[in-house]
Amino acid sequence: MNAWGSLLPATAVVAVLLFIARETLEYFRRRGADKRKVSALTHLLARECELNYWAIKALRYIAIQIPTDENPGEGMQVTIERKPSGRSYARIVSADGGTESHHPVPRVHRELMSKFLLDVATIDRELFVVMEPAYDALSHLEHVRESFVNAPEASDFIGQDGYLEGLAGFALDELLKAEDKIGRLYRHCTGNELTKHRVR
């Protein structure tokens, strides 16, 4: 009886030590996996920021070309049209009709942020703090884009010129805010300023 009594505490101690060792190894394994996941995510998020920086630059260019009371420009005429494929573009014609250019209305990229926002919230709070505002900014950026895309239909009552003139100032304000928030996320992910874009 005494032999069994002295043996039980030893086996209990061994079991506890094995449990602690297993949990410690599992903790470091999970922690290492989370670090690798965050590293991969920051790389992919930086790429998504560059794609959206192109969208911001393209939409800003279109908005700046639209004549307004504050920015009459040089009498450019801007209309939003659709190609047979369904893609929208801005048609910009000079006042004398001598030059004409077409500029695509690029799409907004937020698939990656949508997919991993919850994951980031659980594994990296610092990244989440800058990613959430950037994700919200992309919603506003998408709204600006859709407003341009829908210009041919939305302007039935006031004409496309009047509609676009009202949209231009709003768009420029929203684009500036979006660029700031996306730039913060990019800086967190790369340590660099967002100065380069990616078309695809």
Image: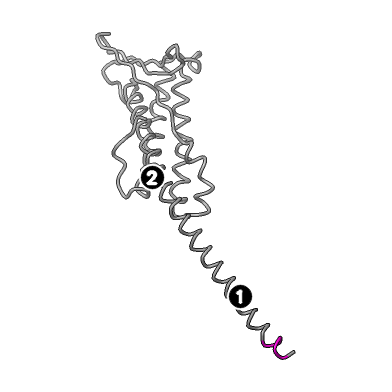
Circle 2: is it few (<14), some (14-19), or many (20+) Cα within 10 Å?
few
Q: Looking at the rendering, in which quadrant would you find the N terminus?
A: bottom right
Q: CA distance from mark 1 to mark 2?
A: 41 Å
- The percent position of residue 159, horizontal first and vertical second, equals 45, 13
Give the SS element for disc 2.
helix
The answer to whether 14 appears left or right of 39 in the picture is right
Is the magenta region chiefly helix, strand or loop?
helix
Q: Which residue is mark 1?
A: 16
Residue type at mark 1 is Val
Question: Is residue 39 rendered magenta in the image?
Answer: no
Query: Looking at this view, is 131 or 95 the one in front?
Result: 131
The picture quadrant where one finds residue 7 is bottom right
- The percent position of residue 197, horizontal first and vertical second, equals 32, 35
Query: Looking at this view, is 72 or 76 the one in front?
Result: 76
Q: Which residue is mark 2?
A: 43
Q: Earlier in the sequence, mark 1 or mark 2?
A: 1
Residue at 44% x, 31% y: name it.
108
Q: Looking at the rendering, in which quadrant would you find the C terminus?
A: top left
Residue at 29% x, 37% y: name it.
196
- The percent position of residue 45, horizontal first and vertical second, equals 41, 42
